[in-house]
Image: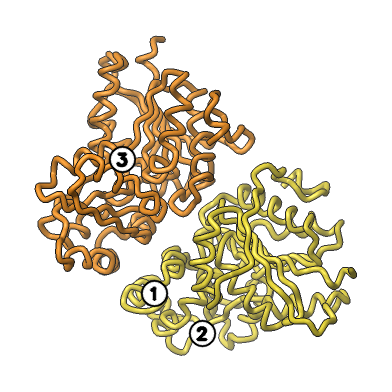
Chain colours: A orange, B yellow
Amino acid sequence: MSRSDLPIGVFDSGVGGLTVLEALRRRLPAEDLLYLGDTARVPYGTRSPDTVRRYALRVGGHLARRGVKALVVACNTATTWALETLEEAAAPLGIPVIGVIRPGVARALECSPSGRIAVIGTEGTVRGGAYGRALLGARPDATITQLPCPLFVSLAEEGWTEGPVASLVAERYLSPLRLSENPPDTLILGCTHYPLLADVIAEVLPGVRLVDSATATADAVAERLADDGLLRRSTRPGRARFLVTDNLERFQIVGERFLGVIPSPAEVVDLSDEDDRALPHRLAAGA
Amino acid sequence: MSRSDLPIGVFDSGVGGLTVLEALRRRLPAEDLLYLGDTARVPYGTRSPDTVRRYALRVGGHLARRGVKALVVACNTATTWALETLEEAAAPLGIPVIGVIRPGVARALECSPSGRIAVIGTEGTVRGGAYGRALLGARPDATITQLPCPLFVSLAEEGWTEGPVASLVAERYLSPLRLSENPPDTLILGCTHYPLLADVIAEVLPGVRLVDSATATADAVAERLADDGLLRRSTRPGRARFLVTDNLERFQIVGERFLGVIPSPAEVVDLSDEDDRALPHRLAAGA
């Protein structure tokens, strides 16, 4: 089997990364996808940076050992805290690592005439400030607002993505953006759960462009695989397989809300006995 | 130091158990309390039973090694899945283990003239059905309704315990109970977060008695320590200390919403290198 026939590894703390998986499927229909949701340790959004790095290395190491040709970090919190560590860890293995932040930032900069850009995400993503730094690095005159909206995750997982509760929560979190002196023209959905709430978010912020990192990330993955000569050449449609570290039943119930179909075939893997720094390299030990 | 001078260990997956800690403080003001919130692995409510047992044994083992005279499982999900395992594990060490379910059940049965009792909790607690079994065991003609209300946890942690969002969520979850043919006269708050939402819950269910396991559990602990001759005899007020497994900053911010004061002194402990079955006994290995 040639390297290009290996699956793309897609890693998230839980179900949220399924929005990225879906975008990859649409953009790269011939590719096999191996998804790992770290459901024994979800959510990453409230963990400390060190803990997120530790968990990410363990999951990345597991996917690397199974054999993947690229690793997509389909989780904003993991991208915020662990992307660099994962890149350094995977480089000796020749595995490119693609996070969701850079592609989302590039897309937002294309979308925003004014440079007034807001970012919403988990507590961890907002605290990490990776979006703000990347946006300001590319456009120093940009006006960036970063806002945690943790309840959006619970709403998406509960399936309450429309109706009065979702609208009221969106209004409470986001109306300050609408009412501010310099309202944003572009909003980055900096958490993979949030695209499920795009409609209620758009109602609160009429005229604001919503940037969903999932499609931007899928484009970035396609470009990177093409550059590296790793695109799969086959007429057989790609297949997706799913791994979780706990509670498969809930993953499939909640996952259906994200994918429209039950994520399958799926199985539980136990990473608890694997070394936290499972990626074989020199830098992870200092991470 | 005599055994009765040891602290009471109080264990929860995160911050919710602080409602139990507070009740213990009020009921047993002379006792020292050692709280451990497993914030690296919170929430337990969506984990599988095996995973909850594994995490609970690790935390219980850590507290046992530090030296506690009793172990209070201040988490409904951990009580549901892991109480028996912890009891078996701690018995050879002579450490009594008290969960939140039996005391809450006893209190609810005292409160309910009709025997129509509803229980709300996390997905894990409801799926486990421990409340239902215990209630029906004691009162076979009872009518039990069990209902997961996962968003209540996010609301409590976000500090949105009153106002339109909290009211609307409570209405959505609980109005079916009010409108049912046989509405309950008693509602068990089967998650340690829920007492923070008692006011909005009471608005949706006027006339229904709310049972908060925290005070019932504190009474049960007092009784057990008295029976075992383990009450601390001292005029010095008891002290509380806090351990978390991750993200101390967030524990203290969110914890203040539960306690009214910042939980302190507090420190981070790393349990990741400890054996999952850290309690030294024969049964945990088969758990």
Q: Which mark is residue B170?
A: 1
According to the picture, the residue beneath numbered tag 2 turns out to be: B185
Quarter of the image with the N terminus of chain B in it:
bottom right
- Say above or below: B90 vs B4: above
Whether residue B14 appears in this view of the structure is yes
Quadrant hosting residue B203: bottom left
For label 2, the SS is loop
Left or right of A157, for residue B6: right
Q: Are marks 2 and 1 on the same chain?
A: yes
According to the picture, the residue beneath numbered tag 3 turns out to be: A101
Q: Amino acid at mark 1?
A: Ala
For label 1, the SS is helix
Q: CA distance from mark 2 to mark 1?
A: 17 Å
Residue B68 coordinates in the image, percent (x, y): 79, 64
Residue A186 coordinates in the image, percent (x, y): 17, 51
* Nearest the eye: A242 or A279: A279
Q: Amino acid at mark 3?
A: Ile
The number of numbered badges drawn on the structure is 3
* Nearest the eye: A17 or B122: A17
Which chain hosts label 3? A
Which chain hosts label 1? B
Which residue appears at 73% of the width and 65% of the height? Answer: B9
State which tag comes first along the sequence, 2 or 1: 1
